[in-house]
Image (cartoon, rainbow, N blue to C red):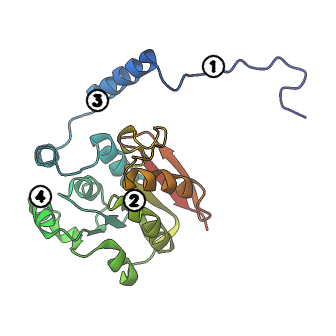
């Protein structure tokens, strides 16, 4: 029997998907939350501005905070990151590591990772972060670490499905896979067009795969540019 049989059905308020009022409310809410949060550390602020100034893709500040909270609540000792860039997301996670924690971060761009390493040294965390300068899919063929607490994916968008297949077996049960850019600046949610770029098409398809991945309990949350988070259940 339906739970509301014999009783008045509750009124469900429908929120429109688009509209000026909703958009202005979201902007106001985000500004409010920005004011509530403390500023990141001076080093993170400097790195954030460095990346933005040079057009280097870095996670949204809210996404960085989210990663920090995940590392803290998991007491994550073993973290793998695909896509280092200037090390902004790496540093958010590294500052939240427990005393024995370690991060392996993969990026073939040595110029970018040299800049990242300079920030890791200044933070006093270089001994806890190992940079691997090879393409992620090549590394994942031989990567020896198992029972990872968290894997964070923010690399080549068209390779996301292959990354997912490779990293889920590396996670411990209840370990998390976290994926950035699933909203893709609004492009993923837009109506498909023949002119859509390969990354947009790939991310739309990946999100469906991610949410239905048999070994994960997964969701996508509108933090930053859209973060997918899935816990290994099998």
Q: How crowded is mark 1: few (under 14 residues within 10 Å), some or many (20 or more)?
A: few
Task: Name the quadrant containing residue 53.
Answer: top left
Q: Are marks 4 and 3 in contact (CB under 8 Å)?
A: no
Query: Which of the two labelled residues, at mark 1 and mark 3, occupies the earlier sequence position?
Result: 1
* 3D distance between C-alphas at marks 2 and 3: 26 Å
Badge number at residue 34: 3
159 relative to 85 in the view: left or right: right
Residue named by callout 4: 119
Q: Are marks 2 and 3 in contact (CB under 8 Å)?
A: no
Q: How crowded is mark 3: few (under 14 residues within 10 Å), some or many (20 or more)?
A: few
Q: Is mark 3 on a helix, strand or loop?
A: helix
The front one of 201 and 142 is 201
Front label number (1 vs 3): 1
Front label number (4 vs 2): 4
Front label number (2 vs 3): 3
The residue at 38%/18% (across/down) is: 24
Residue named by callout 2: 75
Q: Is mark 4 on a helix, strand or loop?
A: helix
Which image quarter holds the N terminus? top right
Residue 88: image location, x then y, percent? 21, 53
Front label number (4 vs 1): 1
Residue named by callout 1: 13
Query: Which of the two labelled residues, at mark 2 and mark 3, occupies the earlier sequence position?
Result: 3
Query: Which of the two labelled residues, at mark 4 and mark 2, occupies the earlier sequence position?
Result: 2
Q: How crowded is mark 2: few (under 14 residues within 10 Å), some or many (20 or more)?
A: some
């Amino acid at each position: 029997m339906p739970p509301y049989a014999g009783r008045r059905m509750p009124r469900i308020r429908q929120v429109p998907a688009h509209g000026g009022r909703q958009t202005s409310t979201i902007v106001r809410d985000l500004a409010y939350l920005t004011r509530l949060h403390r500023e990141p550390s001076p080093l993170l602020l400097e790195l954030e501005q460095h990346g933005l100034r040079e057009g280097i893709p870095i996670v949204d500040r809210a996404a960085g905070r989210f990663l920090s909270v995940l590392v803290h609540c998991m007491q994550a000792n073993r973290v793998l990151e695909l896509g280092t860039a200037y090390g902004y997301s790496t540093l958010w996670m590294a500052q939240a590591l427990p005393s024995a924690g370690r991060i392996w971060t993969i990026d073939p761009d040595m110029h970018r990772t040299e800049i990242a390493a300079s920030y890791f040294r200044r933070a006093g965390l270089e001994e806890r972060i190992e940079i691997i300068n090879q393409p992620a899919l090549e590394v994942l063929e031989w990567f020896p670490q198992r029972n990872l607490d968290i894997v964070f994916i923010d690399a080549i968008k068209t390779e996301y499905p292959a990354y997912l297949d490779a990293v889920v077996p590396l996670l411990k049960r209840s370990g998390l896979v976290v994926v950035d850019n699933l909203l893709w600046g609004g492009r993923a949610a837009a109506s498909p067009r023949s002119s859509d770029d390969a990354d947009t098409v790939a991310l739309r398809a990946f999100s469906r795969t991610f949410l239905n991945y048999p070994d994960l309990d997964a969701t996508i949350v509108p933090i930053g540019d859209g973060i997918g988070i899935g816990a290994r259940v099998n």
